[in-house]
Image (spheres, grey):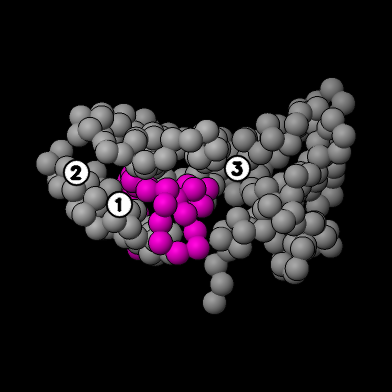
Amino acid sequence: MIKPSILIVEDEPIIAEDIAMNLEDFGYTVLDIVASVNEATNVIAQKKPQLILVDINLEGDKNGIDLGVLLNNKYKIPFIYLTSHYDDNTIALAKATNPTGYILKPFDERDLKINLEMALFKQKPFTYQSEKIFVKKNQKFIALAPHQITYVEAIDNYAYVHTDTERYMISHTLKSIEEKLIDKGFLRVHKSFLINFEHIDSITDGFVLLGTKQVPVGKAYRTILLDFITTL
């Protein structure tokens, strides 16, 4: 039986080793121990962990919350925060990244074990789901493949789904549309714009170009966009 592999992101060596020993006692494989977000993303790209334990305070200019954003939006890997912080602001930021769990230090071994088991149990095996998305136009539902959608724009109380040739008006918020498209290669780059990452032709200061359409990039979303791309 293959043991589940877990990455530990913790910059306190003694705590990291303690966590690692607990994981091994529980029967898990410790894939690696790293102390920063950059080290974590390198390991993720090479070794593909099944679950990640993340401390919120980390070395470098990025913290565990920044890593949580990437894990939720880009890598789609479940993760658990293991931290000594429980103030309202930290918890609010953590919740927005959709973690599988939130364990306070000093942690109880049983609490850690239960959270790990629940997180791994929630990982569902692959099942086929149609990629087709249906949008209503007049009295018909039109089928679209995700790759046909270039971007989605919010205007007033509506959202407009754009393809290369059509525009469909949707009576839903951009946030609710984002929740349905985020796992299909779409990325929020502005409070009013959701883009199909595969349609990006170029990125300039403050804008992305999708064919002939220039979409603004909000300051709050720029870091996420830059973390999402691969540069040479």
The N terminus lies in quadrant: top left
Q: Is residue 90 left or right of residue 208?
A: left
Residue 182 is tagged as 3
Mark 1 belongs to which amino acid? Ile
Residue 82 placed where, x, y %?
A: 35, 42
Q: Residue at x 84, y 22 (%)?
A: 139
Which is nearer the N-term, disc 3 or disc 2?
Answer: 2
Q: CA distance from mark 3 to mark 2?
A: 31 Å
Q: Is residue 131 left or right of residue 170?
A: left
| 68 part of magenta stretch | yes
Question: SS for tag 1?
Answer: strand
Q: Is residue 39 left or right of residue 216?
A: left
Judged from this view, the residue extending furthest toward the top is 139
Residue 97 is tagged as none
Q: Which residues are magenta?
A: 45-69
Residue 170 placed where, x, y %?
A: 80, 31
Question: SS for tag 3?
Answer: helix
Residue 8 is tagged as 1
Question: SS for tag 2?
Answer: helix
Say whether residue 45 is visible: no
The residue carrying mark 2 is 23
Say whether residue 232 is visible: yes
Q: Nearer the viewer, mark 3 or mark 2?
A: 2
| 176 part of magenta stretch | no
